[in-house]
Image (cartoon, rainbow, N blue to C red):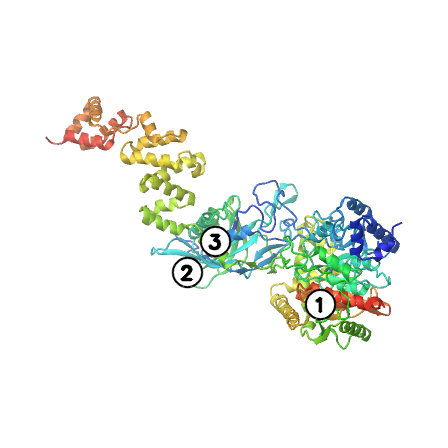
Amino acid sequence: MSAVTDGYEMVIGLEIHCQLKTRTKLFSAASANFGDAPNANTDAVCLGLPGALPVCNKHAIELATRAALGLECTVHPVSVFARKHYFYPDLPKGYQISQFDRPLATGGRVVVGANADGSARVIGITRVHVEEDAGKSVHDRFAGVSAIDLNRAGTPLIEIVSEPDLRSSADAGAYVRAVKQIIEYTDVSDANMEEGSLRVDVNISARPRGSTTFGTRTEIKNLNSISGVERSIEIEFARQCGVLAAGGEVEQRTMLWDGVRNEVRPARSKEGSPDYRYFPEPDLPPLVLEPAFIEAHRAALPELPAAKRARFASQYGLSAADIEQLTVTTTLADRFEAVSKASGDAKRAANWILGVVLASVNARGLDITSHPVSVERLAALIGLEVQGAVSNTAAKQIFAILEQEDAEPSLIAEREGLLQVSDDSALERWIDEVMAEMPAEAARFLAGEKKLQGVLVGAVMKKSKGSADPKKVNQLLGQRVAPG
Amino acid sequence: MSDRSILARSAADVAADIVAGVLPTTAALDACRDAATSVQVGPEGLNAALWFDAAHARESLTSASMHGALAGIPVAVKDNIATLRMPTTCGSRMLEGYVSPFEATVVARLHAAGAVIPMKTNMDEFAMGSSTENSAWGPTKHPMDPARVPGGSSGGSAAVVAAGVTRIALGSETGGSVRQPAAFCGIVGVKPTYGRVSRHGLVAFASSLDQVGVFGQSVDDAALGLQVIAGVDPLDSTTVDAPVADYRATRDITGDRPLAGVVVGRPLEYFPASLDPAMRALLDRAADTLRALGAEIRDVSLPHTDLAIPVYYIVAPAEASSNLARFDGVRYGLRVDDGDGLRGMYEATRSRGFGPEVTRRILLGTYVLSAGYYDAYYKRAMAVRRLITDDFARVFASGVHVLLTPTTPTTAFLAGTKKDPYEMYLSDIFTATANLAGVPAMSQPIGRIEGLPVGGQLLAAQFDEATMFRVAYALERALGEEAHR
């Protein structure tokens, strides 16, 4: 298919804003809780009252440091807050306290899958800085007027700026997932895109393939889903290519994504690029982090996604696809490892977790750690399966009972008659009955029509209500046609 | 009728008598109320007090615990320092009727020490000015000559103390706004080290220069006031957790040579050839007095002094343009809805809310922070500011303990005579350096020229207010009534 985009390459850099999981705001003691009544979580500082001064939230700095280390950045012992000025009703002070020329951290990297040649695909992180969020303007609540909710004003954010290393919408989506995963692993944010605790700005430009210079970029602001990131990139790229192919020039400007109409359109035009008049925040001394503080946080970092994936591969010998799924969150990975350890069978543990357990967790809308079937019960159940005491089918039935009733799986198996029967005489009796009930199929099978064995095994399994050991049944049926 | 003689005694003595039960708790407040009436501190007279509520203050007194260093002592507070109940308007139409829902740390500390705050005092709008002519609520008059200005921007507080209505008042300093009016009005005015006193609740003008300052009728009144409000505050991250000395420790030291071992520097840049000879003579007399008290007088140099005014008028407006961005008509204060959308509301509100001097400085500050100008102005100014700071550090490291200079180039000028803003800016020429360098400084009366007070300025190393007060106490005692002649 020939498209307007043929012959062009996209160059993308992302800015990810991530709300840090603190009890209070970045510069005041007001609650940072989400979802409360409008303006309930405000105080003199977040209202920008005359005479109010910011006081830096230490916990926010700890979380930001942890995130920056998780993104493999260099965390600087001295960074500086700066004021970024613009007038908007949901920005109470007329400036946002951010960081500018001396950010908290610089020079990180994130592994995003693999390149075509199999090598790790590394996306550079330019910087991670700390800043306060603005409030929210509500334009559709009251007729004819806008309302302002300042609950979000002053909540702590980190902004993670990538290098312009991304080359496709899928690349960008994978990068967002990878960063989100690191954020979740380091437990610094809920990283919930629907609630706005993780938001993405896309910087995108198009250039002729083979070119090494960058084209003029546009910025798509405030994307709150990965599909929005991917779709808006495709649409904006096509638009830019169209402009370039027609001999035009891309105008540097801010765009907005409309996910409902599936379109990217220019933000209300501003003359030229905004002048934020940054200067160092005089109300806050430089942010000084002792090297011991930084090292303590580095030492306390959890195992990060890439390391965990590598370890799972070597330690458990699982497939890449299974590992990818198991390491999506640390809670899932931890659950898998617990079940694997308790049952002694990593492969079965992985199958159970990714299959039956996740389906049940999702159906119940639960967190895996609060699922009613405990690690010990699941491990015991897998143990029964490994011993051959129950079939996989029976095990699934027992699992369903365990969801309702906390009991020893072996006792349930016994009570429900689900213990696998491998006793020859019992099996022979069922086989005899099936052969008698299905004379035609039996005759053809005995005459050498091998493919009918499956039908007969199925019938035996049915007759035994799943308790027959299918391996054994196969073996016994096979003996009946064996010569001699 | 109250006992007016109470106002002739030091705040410390009166507070001690109130604590001891020798004086009724309301004695000082009643004297203050009657003095305020007789000198007319309100708009009908000096226009020094914007808000005066002795009745309410009296109520708060009876319930207050009377044990503190300022027990029962009325303290006037500048209108840019947040108080509960009374408005905090910063002398601006923008904040007409605005009452803060929280009080400044300095106000809380005054209350905790037993002080009572019966009034808010007039000021140049948002502390921008040197004459208290820039108030939206009209100019304050000089208590000794209504045709003259009391200085500014804390002119209301200076006038109230000079008129004998209170012994102590709070002002604020960004470039000399306490010391200059103290000099004009013939009282004591102290600007502490940057970081010595909390700015929480002080409406910001230029955050890196602002400090709350104290006026006193005497050195001891000012030292006592500072003692109460000084010290680190968790609500202001720029305060410093340095020990607060006993500023009044040297108040009673007498003897032949109480300043033996003290080196007083005289920076030649503060004594230009153009200096009024009468003022030079008063400074010489002060130096001779200090020498007679045992101090060594040493001529020193602070070579970057002449850059202070240009640097100040870049840094201060830059920070002001940022600090005053919050006055947008959205959440509190004035809003002028002109029906022309958000931008129209911003423009109308800010055009009508701010007076011409504030507007001028916002524009200047916005300009120097703009892309393409930042490096040439703000960044460069901050580099020069460092040189000015280093000048002081070098002099104080060389064994000099305090510096002696004139506080102002002139005595109180006639109202309405400084039409050119730049000419007005030059009245800060000897004071702005201390704010830029963050060092403590104070002005005290050292004599008069044609009946108008002249201030002598003492400056000390950062956080060494104690030495500054030691010299000030000795000089005050030695000059005696000469300081007011």
Q: Amino acid at mark 1?
A: Leu
Q: Secondary structure at mark 1?
A: strand
Q: Residues within 10 Å of mark 3 (few under 14, many from 20)?
A: some
Viewer-closest of B222 and B474: B474
Return the residue at label 2.
A209
Which residue is situated farthest in the front direction here?
Answer: B255
Circle 2 chain: A
Q: Position of residue B133 (x, y in %)?
A: 80, 60
Q: Say which label, 2 or 3, has the lower sequence index.
A: 2
Vertical side of A406 occupied by B53: above or below: below
- Quarter the C terminus of chain A occupies: top left
Q: CA gap, disc 2 to disc 3?
A: 43 Å
Which numbered marker is on residue B459?
A: 1
Q: Amino acid at mark 2?
A: Arg
Q: Kindly indicate whether the residues beneath marks 2 and 3 are on one polypeptide chain.
A: yes
Q: Please, what is the three-letter code of the amino acid marked with disc 3? A: His
Q: Mark 3 — residue?
A: A297
Residues at marks 2 and 1, CA–CA distance in whole angstroms: 67 Å
